[in-house]
Image: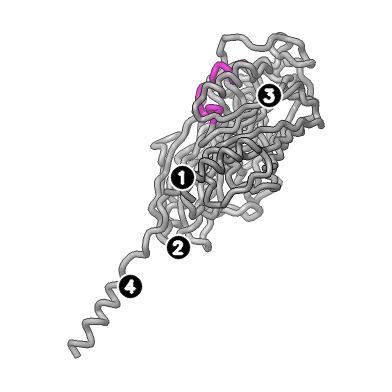
Amino acid sequence: MNIGMKIAVALSCVALLQGCHHDDDDDDQPLSLMDFSVMTTNLTNNQPLSPLALALHGESELLNVGMSASKGLEHMAEGGDNTLLLEEFVLNERVDTTASGTGLIMPGDYETLMLTTSLSDVHLSLSSMLVNSNDGFVAVDGAALNELKVGESLTLYAPVYDAGTEANSESMATIPGPAAGGEGYNSERDDRDFVSIHPGILTETSGLVDSVLNSGHRFDNPAAKVVVTRLQ
Amino acid sequence: MKKRMIPLLTLAALSATPAMADKDFDATLTNLTHSLYFTPLLVTAHDDSTYLFKSGMAASANLQAMAEGGDIAGLSMDLAAVNADIVENPAAGLLAPGASTTASFTPMKENEQLSIVGMMLPTNDGFVGLNSLDIPEKKGTYTYYLNAYDAGTEANNEIINGGGMPGVLGIPADPSGMSGVNGTGVVDNEHNMTVHIHRGAVGDMDAMGGSSDLNSGVHRWLNPVAKLVITVK
């Protein structure tokens, strides 16, 4: 196939969007689109998940694990607001497309979001606050979707990270979720200031006398199941 | 006679040549915990009949020395005896929470599996572990998450007393400097005396007493405790 024909085929793919087949050796063509559905199930006992922030992007990670959290990640992890994080994704040249959840995902509930990308080397990142925590969030950080064929699914189990931007006091004043009704985001960084795996909820029974949380708010990893299906 | 010896010598020389190197790769490990340190890591590519530990099996004496005191010399000698590729202590000391270190390999052909161990401080006999992962062959980047194991060789009494020698009860040290003193001991025996998934630290909030010298707000963790990225070149 010459270059002119390749462009013509690629353009017709864009025009039709669906039902466009291409040869296997055309996988590097930037305009062959892939559609994914991402179904996120809340596996915790009593930790509603804040509206999801999703991104499809090139290699490899997006969430600064082991490093200082971005401002957008801090906003999402402390207050459940994904607006600034999604704006950061859009400004990141490695990110091709983003999606936002429509609301809280309650324990046992799930939400399915759709994304379409023209990337050939595609990775998924996903994050959402555990709202009855100081700055805990469940995340998938750059899972490779390259091997997924049309109709295939990939199941990922997501652990809970700690943004490292707010001390895990568990106090009523500092947790925004329904367990406390306290403050969400603030600009102060009074914890280790790097993203780690969350050490878990303590509660008063572990000696944290100011904790407003109870044993029902504890969690273990994984905290969410993420099923990615390639539709096209 | 002379004519026949030359090809024989050539053959002998060929067979003495070291096995061809397999694909080069980097193994980058990130400490994902909030406040625990890894003692000098042992990272190794080895053949499929070698292992450092297996869950559900009793720890070797050399694994015990690593898990209770951070001493990897014995395990490293075991590996050298089976021609493993070995990288000792890539972080040149403790690997702090959030920090990363990389071990680079040009492995011998038969060394197709990767294992990693390093003690977690402060614990009695907890370690971050990877047992015999098949090293990917295709060029690319591969991510894995590692769990914390309990060697099953020492009771998790959570008392920091400098005890790091095998069989000496207690925790050698707390690099975070956030521990307490005068704990009475959380437990004095271990139910599972094989290598198993660590149940985590208990700790307390009493710096001058209580049952544990660990701080429940600092020294707890959940799995995974490390991220491993293998880059096959």
The residue where tag 1 is placed is: A3
Disc marking residue A100: 3
Could you tell me if residue A108 is visible in this image? yes
Picture coordinates of residue B37 (x, y %)? 51, 32
Mark 1 lies on a secondary structure that is helix
Q: Residue at x 73, y 9 (%)?
A: A182
Q: Residue A64 in magenta? A: yes
Q: Residue at x 68, y 23 (%)?
A: A129
Mark 2 lies on a secondary structure that is loop
Asked if the residue at tag 1 contacts the one at tag 2, i.e. Cβ–Cβ closer than 8 Å, the answer is no
Are both tags, 1 and 3, on one chain? yes
User: Relative to A220, is A61 on the left or the right?
Assistant: left
The residue where tag 2 is placed is: B110
Asked if the residue at tag 3 contacts the one at tag 2, i.e. Cβ–Cβ closer than 8 Å, the answer is no
**Res A98 → quadrant:** top right
The chain to which mark 2 is attached is: B
Q: Residues within 10 Å of mark 4 (few under 14, many from 20)?
A: few
Picture coordinates of residue B2 (x, y %)? 18, 87
Amino acid type, mark 4 = Ser
Residue A141 sits above or below residue A147 on the image: above
Give the alpha-carbon distance from disc 3 to disc 4, as whole Å. Answer: 61 Å
Q: Earlier in the sequence, mark 1 or mark 3?
A: 1
Give the alpha-carbon distance from disc 2 to disc 3, as whole Å. Answer: 48 Å
**Res A224 → quadrant:** top right
Q: Earlier in the sequence, mark 4 or mark 2?
A: 4
Question: Magenta span covers which residues?
Answer: A62-75
Residue A133 sits above or below residue B184 on the image: above
Front position among marks 1 and 3: 1
Are both tags, 2 and 3, on one chain? no
> Would you say the magenta stretch is mainly helix, strand or loop?
loop
Asked if the residue at tag 2 contacts the one at tag 4, i.e. Cβ–Cβ closer than 8 Å, the answer is no
Q: Residues within 10 Å of mark 3 (few under 14, many from 20)?
A: some
